[in-house]
Amino acid sequence: MAEYYGKDRAAEIVRNIKETIKFETPHIGFILGSGWGHVAKNLEHAQTVSYQSIGMPPCGVAGHEGNLIFGKLSGVPVVLVQGRYHLYEGRDIAETVLPVCVVKELGASSVVLTNAAGGINAAYEVGDLMFLSDHINLTGRNPLIGVKATDEYPIFIDMSSVYDREMRMALETASSRKGVNAHRGVYMQVLGPSFETPAEIRAFRSMGADAVGMSTVCEAVFARYLRLKVAGISCITNMAAGMTAGQIKHEDVLEESKKREVKFSALLREFVREYVK
């Protein structure tokens, strides 16, 4: 496998995993955001390794457990990345994309990025899903800054179709079968950790954003650099500032996510069944 940025560190982590457990090469990696952890309960032959036991930094945010879980979903070998790193924690951007790099080094060809997001589109309701059709990076950061380009891994990567059409269509088919209300939309990543102001949300809407959160986009950029197929899913856990009355709290975001864990887990099982035929 050719050299790419982050390969050495990811390769060491994968060696540590192989010294701990035996597993089948995953076909898909799932990076699980807030409220998506229930997927792990439906894995067949699940094996869990903690981040710390394999040389990965611990997670620092509530709702992110910090485990890699290997097993099968609908009979397909997968790896679940149970917890992510965020820029607002003060982490280096290379660390925030480390789980994507590990998914690549494990041999997966596709990655599904999930998150909890605030709804900006007035047609959305709390509990809906949004399948990412595009994104806006408002963090001021890019994981490829300073990365040395190679012939096989250039840094001037085409971003005209970040999110894979085939994966998105499989998600839409799965959501229809499972009765999950879902939309296609544009996701915006901001730096955080404070939630947005009503004026910022009005500005984001005018820019074309349908939902906003504090993760995912930089991971998607890096996944495309690594030549992984990418899908993105946002759970609309709250309407963004100014859309409804009341305050926005992280605890409420986690609670709304938790209410829908079982349904979202069933959706991802159906997605795998549809996507990997």
Image (cartoon, rainbow, N blue to C red):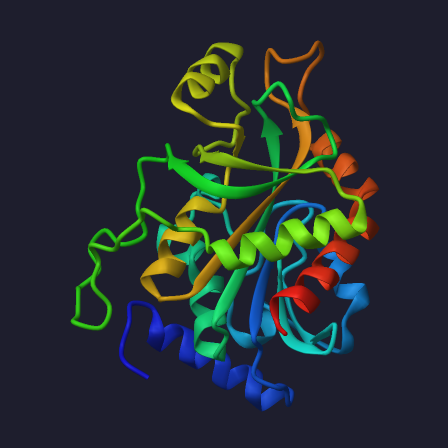
Residue 175 in percent (x, y) is at 72, 48
User: Can see residue 36?
Assistant: no
User: Can see residue 177?
Assistant: yes
Q: Does 129 appear above or below 207?
A: below
Q: Nearer the viewer, residue 132 or 140?
A: 132
**264 on left or right of 10:** right
Q: Considering the image in quadrants, where does the C terminus appear?
A: bottom right
Q: How many marks?
A: 0
Residue at horizontal 48 percent and vertical 79 percent from the top: 107
Residue 141 in percent (x, y) is at 31, 41
Q: Does 21 appear above or below 35?
A: below
Asked which quadrant contains residue 62, the reply is: top right
Q: Does 243 appear above or below 135?
A: above
Q: Does 167 appear above or below 247?
A: below
Q: Nearer the viewer, residue 58 or 192?
A: 192
Residue 146 in percent (x, y) is at 20, 55
Residue at horizontal 60 percent and vertical 28 percent from the top: 118
Residue 125 in percent (x, y) is at 71, 26
Q: Considering the image in quadrants, where does the N terminus appear?
A: bottom left
Asked which quadrant contains residue 257, the reply is: top right
Residue at horizontal 49 percent and vertical 85 percent from the top: 15
Q: Nearer the viewer, residue 156 or 35?
A: 156
**30 on left or right of 149:** right
Residue at horizontal 66 percent and vertical 26 percent from the top: 124
